[in-house]
Amino acid sequence: MLDSVYVGRQEIEAYVPITGEEAIEEVRKLAAALRGSRILHLNATPYGGGVAEILRSEVPLLRDLGISADWKTITGDKEFFGVTKAMHNALQGAERGLTEHEKEIYLTYSTRNARLLEEEYDLIVAHDPQPLAIPRFHGRGETRWIWRCHIDTSEPHPGLWEFLRPFLDDYDAAVFTMPGFVPPRFPVERTEIIPPAIDPQSPKNFELGTATASRVLRWMGVDTERPLLTQVSRFDPWKDPLGVIAAYRLVREEVPGTQLALVGSMALDDPEGWEVYRRIRDETAKEPDIHLFTNLTGVSNVEVNAFQRLSDVVIQKSIREGFGLVVSETLWKRTPVVAGRAGGIPLQMEGGAGGFLIESVEECAQRALELLRDPDRGRELASRGHDLVRERFLITRLLKDELALYASLLDAA
């Protein structure tokens, strides 16, 4: 059997003080039509990255709403996840596709995981390319299948896209973050646009007092009396951590004593992350004001919460991006953001809310300096960003959108 992920308990009622009773009642009504339905979310890893974070909140809320929801992860070794990371990069536009041997590895593990999927479900949501081929080898039966693509697939590698595209014939619907992410000649007739969202009640986002957050950062070796820039992300070339370091060095020339924290997560399905981590470590080894942290060296959701609350500026210098949950997480805490104009990031900073969108190292440094020198402006921008997140990017809105889609596919509306 595939591994099940334990998610604890959540109650939809707890979100009423944040979103209001009317919004929660909408979610309840949609869920009522699906009560008892068996729904599975299927992905590659139980931790590290936005998909796992969303599912850790969403699945227990679905259960609280009366739906029989599960979350399972596929199996694979280092070689398989090396192949799927190459697929991820190629789908985002990298020039390297897959060799014939790598395709065989992907198909072998897809077949194996299909056999391990033993339970019956009314609806299965497969997240990203790792489990994409499973319905082909498992068989559809009476199950409705959704492919949920969280990455920017607007310009996929042609060879890889030709390899993956036939597997999408087995899906009843597909979900993307933005219309522009839908790849060319997409074969799934029903395509929905549903942006991701954050959970304001999760340990990463719940209220954390300044005194407690300050104690957390001091415990980790950060001087809370000096300026702090932070990037929270996977250690991934698309997040451009070396570009963040270059921008930080320009800022430090103007504001001596400024610190940089690079807070990254290591995920089971991302062996490339260790290579990027080692590159950053070697690049910054002789700079004590650059702090490098991972989820394997003491950084959990609460530590990330503290970093996002107490940083003077949070940087998300993505080159390509699916959505970038860390932007909404940061704005929810009323901290200004300087971010790459990539993927779903502009959705979260519409009309200048939250901070500044940038396209170069120099512009990143310039905008970070502006916010360091004018913290009142930063607070005003961040407050506008907080309001935008409350309106569009909380998990209650995500639940509403997804429940409507599930009900339609299961004829339960």
Image (cartoon, helix red, strand yellow):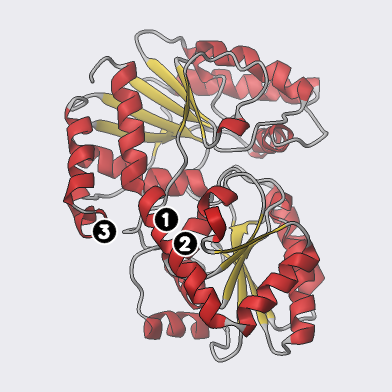
SS class, disc 3: helix
User: Label 2 belongs to which residue?
Assistant: 385
Q: Earlier in the sequence, mark 3 or mark 2?
A: 3
Circles 1 and 2, Cβ within 8 Å, touching? The answer is: yes
On the image, which quarter does residue 92 sit in?
top right
Q: Residue at image x 23%, y 45%?
A: 23
Question: Disc 1 to disc 2, how far (Cα)?
Answer: 6 Å
**Place of residue 29 in the rendered image (x, y in percent of width and height, measured from the top left):** 17, 33
**Place of residue 233 in the rendered image (x, y in percent of width and height, measured from the top left):** 60, 58
Q: Residue at image x 76%, y 85%?
A: 254
User: Label 3 belongs to which residue?
Assistant: 18
Amino acid found under the numbered disc labelled 1? Val
SS class, disc 2: helix
Q: Is residue 203 left or right of residue 293?
A: left
Q: Residue at image x 50%, y 48%?
A: 50
Q: Is residue 1 above or below residue 239?
A: above
Q: Earlier in the sequence, mark 1 or mark 3?
A: 3
- Number of residues whose C-alpha sits closer than 10 Å to that of mark 2, classed few (under 14), some (14–19) or many (20 or more): many
Amino acid found under the numbered disc labelled 3? Ile
Amino acid found under the numbered disc labelled 2? Gly
User: Label 1 belongs to which residue?
Assistant: 389
Judge whether residue 100 can be spotted in this image.
yes
Q: Nearer the viewer, residue 351 or 76?
A: 351
SS class, disc 1: helix
Q: Nearer the viewer, residue 13 or 262?
A: 13
Q: Is residue 255 above or below residue 274?
A: below
